[in-house]
Amino acid sequence: MSNVTSHKEWSITCRDVAGRRRDLTVFVRQGRVVLVAPPGETAVLNPLDVGRLRAVLRDAVVDASQAEAREN
């Protein structure tokens, strides 16, 4: 029986400081929440984007907690 893990990934659209569209990516790895920002850039979020990021982080924490519970 193989050990298959589901890999959920969420993406939040943002802008860099020059106004170009970029993405923040959130995923869970080994029971930890990982946030990947645009390489070498700053992510600029408007209030709605911050709300979306908050919701995605909440979902990722739930997934991380469930993964940790399965391991124990």
Image (tube, grey):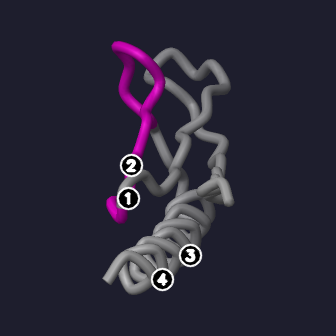
State the residue position of label 2.
34
Magenta residues, start to end = 31-43
The question of residue 66 being in magenta is answered with no
Callout 1: helix, strand or loop? strand
In the image, residue 35 sits, relative to residue 42, either above or below, namely: below
Query: Upstream in the sequence, badge 4 or badge 3?
Result: 3
Q: Position of residue 58 (x, y in %)?
A: 48, 78
Q: Which quarter of the picture shows residue 51?
A: bottom right
Tags 1 and 2 in contact by the CB under 8 Å rule?
yes
Query: Upstream in the sequence, badge 1 or badge 3?
Result: 1
Q: Give amino acid for label 1.
A: Val
Residue drawn at x 39%, y 86% is: 69
State the residue position of label 1.
33
Q: Give amino acid for label 3.
A: Asp
Q: Which mark is residue 15?
A: none
Residue neighbourhood size for the residue with mark 1, other residues' Cα within 10 Å, grouped as few (<14), some (14–19), many (≥20): some
Query: Upstream in the sequence, badge 4 or badge 1?
Result: 1
Alpha-carbon span between mark 2 and mark 3: 12 Å
Residue drawn at x 68%, y 60% is: 1
Q: Which mark is residue 66?
A: 4
